[in-house]
Each structure stands twice: as structure tokens, then as C-alpha cells.
Amino acid sequence: ETGVTQTPRHLVMGMTNKKSLKCEQHLGHNAMYWYKQSAKKPLELMFVYNFKEQTENNSVPSRFSPECPNSSHLFLHLHTLQPEDSALYLCASSHQDAGITNEKLFFGSGTQLSVL
Amino acid sequence: GESVGLHLPTLSVQEGDNSIINCAYSNSASDYFIWYKQESGKGPQFIIDIRSNMDKRQGQRVTVLLNKTVKHLSLQIAATQPGDSAVYFCAENEYGGSQGNLIFGKGTKLSVKP
């Protein structure tokens, strides 16, 4: 148990569906992240939230919409996805001190998404 | 673009032997490096990290070596056990780089033979 919990573990959706991924961290961290992990590709950063404020958005298509209501919860809302969006979506959290590079991320187990 | 890469996609070792997983990076401005282990069905798990002002750091059964001259990073696992079977990722971040924007390698799959 890493202290980062993701639900659901598996999700199958059609291209016209709307679904949401949920992440909760119990570590008292102040930053949360969404990563995408596709087969045979490196992990890709999607979104970063620091103190609930979005600080990074790595050119992610608008069909992915993040939400961070507080420093412990993170959502990824999905709508009109494409088959190529099928991947493992990983949530992570970390403790960030201002001005210090500290990228020790704690990951959840991910949501395996299949888009039909 | 600059990226982190791995020399070998797979590595098979005998239980009890030492394992060495290699990683090459190309960004000379990178100052923080980290190794993750990902077991099947789980997210990446932190193993060990190192900053560019060091060339070696040891943990429990693991050692990370950093050679900035040739931009090479390695992870050594002593007395490899079946539980060490996983995919290992190296990642880097540049000093002052954007938060969370670790650059990950594609991973090396370590298989431990009993």
C-alpha cells in the first residue's frame, strides 16, 4: 500500500461515454499528478496540481479534464475518448518544498482504461 | 529532444546473483535522478534517488551510481531475489525544471530465475 488509492482499477468505456477516474492520497502531500502509461512508451506527465492549483498541463487534449477539489483528492474526467487513449492512468503525489527539486513521487496502482 | 534511455530492454539473472541495470541520459543539465520499480499490476514504486553532486548512493541491497562524464546511471541490486522481478525505470529532472516533469526511460524488465 503506497498511500495513494485509485478507483476504479479497470474501466471499459465506449467513445461516447463519460466517466471519471478518482485518486486519493493519505500521505499529507501537497502536490498531485496524472500520468499516462502506454505499452512500450515512457510514462507521460499529463497534469500537475500544487496546493490544488493546476501548474502544468502538458498539451493534453480537452477530452481529458482534471479536477482537484482539495490536496487529497484528484479526478480525471473523461469524455468522447478515442481508442488510442487506452492505457494505464497513474495518479501520483509528492511533497513539494518551494524552490527545491524533489520529484520523489508516490504512485497509485493505476486505472487500466480500455476505450472501445 | 533530450531523453533518458536504457541500454537493455530485458535482463535475466540467477537468484542470488547481483543485477546491474543501466541507463543513459543526454541532458547535461539534469541534476536529479531516480529509480523506480514497477511490478505487474502495480504503479511505479520509488527505489532510490541521487543528486548530481554525488556519484554513489546506497540503500538496502541497492546502489545507484552516477557518472556525469559519460551521462550514465546504473542501479545495482545485490543478491537478487525473485521478488525483485519487475520493470525498472530510471528518470531525470533538470535543475529548475518544471514540477513533476520527470523524464522517464522506457524501462528494463528484470527476470529472476530460481
Image: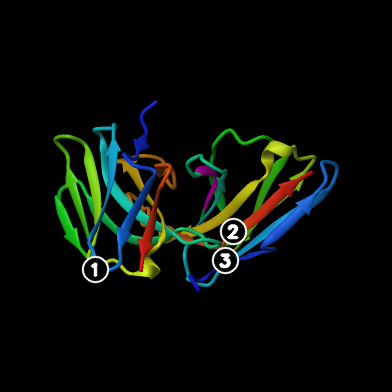
Check the picture and name the quadrant holding the C terminus of chain B.
Answer: bottom left
Residue situated in front as seen by the camera: B33 or A58? B33
Q: Is residue A16 above or below residue A31?
A: above
Q: CA distance from mark 3 to mark 2?
A: 16 Å
Q: Residue at x 75, y 40 (%)?
A: A81
The chain carrying label 1 is: B
Q: Is residue A60 above or below residue B79?
A: above
Residue situated in front as seen by the camera: A115 or B29? A115
Q: Can you tell which quarter of the image residue B102 is in?
A: top left
Q: Which residue is mark 2?
A: A110
What's drawn in magenta, residue-wise? Answer: A44-49
User: In the picture provided, is A2 more to the left or to the right than B25?
Assistant: right
Are there few (<14), some (14-19), or many (20+) residues within 10 Å of tag 2?
Answer: many
Tell me whether marks 1 and 3 sit on the same chain.
no
Tell me whether marks 3 and 2 sit on the same chain.
yes
- Label of residue B79 in the image: 1
The earlier-in-sequence mark between 3 and 2 is 3
- Label of residue A47 in the image: none
Q: Residue at x 30, y 58 (%)?
A: B13
Disc 3 on helix, strand or loop?
loop
Give the colour scheme shown.
rainbow
Check the picture and name the quadrant holding the N terminus of chain B.
Answer: top left
Q: Which residue is mark 3?
A: A72
